[in-house]
Amino acid sequence: MAKIKNDIIYDEEHNLAADIYLPDEASKTTKVLIFWHGGGWIRGDKGDVKDLCLKMTQKGFTVFVPNYRLAPTNTFPAAHDDTVKFVEWLLNSDYTGTNTKGITQIGASSGGVMALYIAGKYGFPTVTWSAPVNYSAWMKEHENTTASIDARGELGLTDPKEINDAFYKYFGLAYAGSNDAATFEKLDAKSYDYSNLGHLWLINSADELSPLKYVLDFIQDLADQDRGSELTVLPGQKHAMAYANEYIDASLAYLMQMM
C-alpha cells in the first residue's frame, strides 16, 4: 500500500497544499510525477484524483498533486504562478534531492494547460489529457455564445456541443477575469516560452470540449519553433478524466521511457 501525506503546505502565503503519494519503497531516486487536476480553473481539488494516483504509485512513481488558486476569486495568471511556486518548492525539497531529471508530469484539461506552461520552463517529460490550448481565437468565434456553468439547467440547452461551448466560455471568462482579448492571448498555450521543452505527448478526443483544430495549430506552432511533440486522437467525445483509466498505463509508460 502506498503511503499518503495529505495537505503538505507548499505556499504559506496563499495556504496552498499538495497531497503526496509514496510507493512502498520510495527514495530520492524514485520517479516523481506531478499531476495537475482539471476543472477549468474554477473547481477541482487534489483529493478528487486519489484512486488514479494510487495506480501511479503501483508503477513506482511518487505522485504530487498540488492545489492551486481558483477563479473567479483568483484570475489569470494566479494558477499559473502557483504552478511555478510548487515546482520551485519541490526542487528545493527533500523529496527530490538532486534527482531533478526524474520529474515528470500529467495534466488533465485545464491542468494540461499548466503542464504545458511548466514543460516549457523546466523541460519535464509531459503528457496532457485534453488540454484546451486556445482561448483568444475561440472567444472571437463564439461571441454570441452565452457563458454558463450549467447550460442544460440555466439555458435549457440539450445539444452536447452547445453545452460544452457555454461551459468553455464560462470558465475562460472566469479565469481571464474579463473579456479582454490581450489576456486571452496570454492564456493561449502558444504564447508560453518553450525554450526548455522536452518530450511532450498530447492526447485529445476527436470531438470534445477542447476543439481539435486548435491542438493541431498548436503543434504546428511548436514545429515552427523546431519543437517536437506527439499527438494521439481518440475517437468520440470523451474529455480528459473520462478516458484517464484507459490511458494511464500508456501515459506512465511514455513518461518512464522519456525520463
Image (spheres, rainbow, N blue to C red):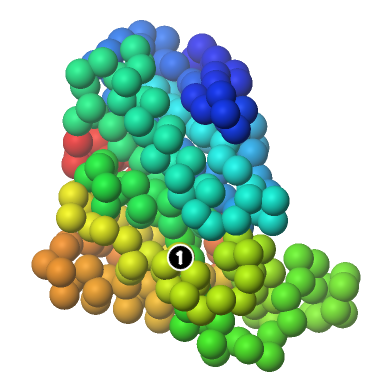
**242, 38: nearer the viewer:** 38
**39, 173: nearer the viewer:** 173
Count residues near mark 1 (Cα–Cα under 10 Å), then give few for <14, some for 14-19, many for 20+. Answer: many
- Determine whether 256 is above or below 115 in the image: above
**35, 41: nearer the viewer:** 41
- Determine whether 37 is above or below 34 in the image: below
- Is residue 133 at least partly visible in the picture? no
Amino acid at pointer 1: Leu
- Relative to 115, 67 lies left or right: right
- Is residue 64 at least partly visible in the picture? yes
Disc 1 marks which residue? 187
- The percent position of residue 15, horizontal first and vertical second, equals 61, 28
Which type of secondary structure does the marked residue at label 1 adopt? helix
- The percent position of residue 186, horizontal first and vertical second, equals 42, 67
- Relative to 170, 210 lies left or right: left
Q: Residue at x 48, y 41 (%)?
A: 82
Quadrant placement of the C terminus: top left
